Amino acid sequence: MNKLWVCLFCFAFLVSCNDDEEAKKIVQKPSFATETGEGITLTYTDSGQVKARLKSPLMQHFSMSAKPYTLMPKGVEGTFYDANKNAASFAYADIGIYYEKEKYLVMKQNVRLINVKGDTLSTEYLVWDEVKEKIYTDKFVKITTPNQLIYGDGLVSNQNFTEYRITNVKGNINLKKNP
C-alpha cells in the first residue's frame, strides 16, 4: 500500500510541475558556473585567422543559461589583430562578459582601449562585436591622442580603433608639446 501512495505522490508532483514555468526556469537556468578556470587565454579565429585573444585570471562559463555566456569577474585583457596578423589594439577592463551565441564581448568598469598609434579610449562600458568587427558604446568616452583630448557620449569604431566616430562630442582640446 505504501508503494501505491509513493507512486501517486510522484505522479501528482510531476503533473503539477509539468506546467509550472518557474520550475522549468530553475531546472533550465542554473545560476552557477558549469565550468570555471584560472589563468585562461581564449583565441578567436575566423577561417584560421586569429582575430582576437582574451586573457583573464578567472573565467566562469554559464553554458546552461538561456543566453550562454562566459564571465570574467576579475578582469579581462584583449588583443585584436589586423588582417596581417599584427596586434592592432589592446583592451583592458575590470569585468568582461562574452556571449558565445551572439558573439560579442561586453567590457565594464575602467575600460581602456589603446591602438598602435597610442590613441587611448577610456570609458565604463564597451562592446566588441566579433562578427561585425566593431567596437561601440553609448556611454561617456574620453579619447586621448598625442595632440588632442576629446570627450563624447558614445563611440563606434572598427575593432582596431583606427577609424572611429564619436557621438555628441563634448569637447576637443588641442594639446601642444613644449619645445
Image: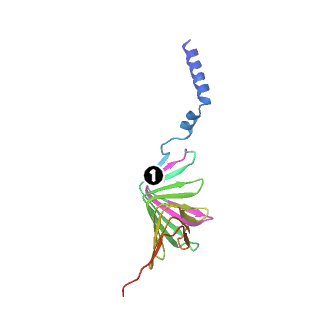
Say left or right for 73 vs 11. left
Residue 70 location (% of width, % of height): 51, 52
Q: Is residue 60 magenta?
A: yes
- Judged from the image, the secondary structure of the residue bearing numbered disc 1 is strand
Count of numbered labels shown in the rendering: 1
Between residues 3 and 24, which one lies in front from this camera angle?
Answer: 24
As drawn, the residue found furthest toward the top would be 1
Q: Is residue 142 magenta?
A: no
Q: Residue at x 52, y 55 (%)?
A: 98
Q: Quadrant of residue 104?
A: bottom right
Residue 134 location (% of width, % of height): 57, 65
Q: Main secondary structure of the magenta part?
A: strand
As drawn, the residue found furthest toward the left would be 179
Q: Residues within 10 Å of mark 1 (few under 14, many from 20)?
A: few
Q: Quadrant of the C terminus?
A: bottom left
Instruction: Name the residue that disc number 1 marks.
Output: 37
Q: Residue at x 42, y 80 (%)?
A: 175
Above or below residue 85? Residue 130 is above
As drawn, the residue found furthest toward the bottom would be 179
Q: Which residues are magenta?
A: 42-64
Above or below residue 63? Residue 146 is below
Residue 105 location (% of width, % of height): 53, 58
Between residues 128 and 146, which one lies in front from this camera angle?
Answer: 146
Q: Quadrant of the N terminus?
A: top right
Above or below residue 11? Residue 44 is below
Residue 32 location (% of width, % of height): 48, 43
Between residues 152 and 36, which one lies in front from this camera angle?
Answer: 152
Colour convention of the picture:
rainbow
Above or below residue 171? Residue 22 is above
Q: Type of residue at label 1?
A: Gly
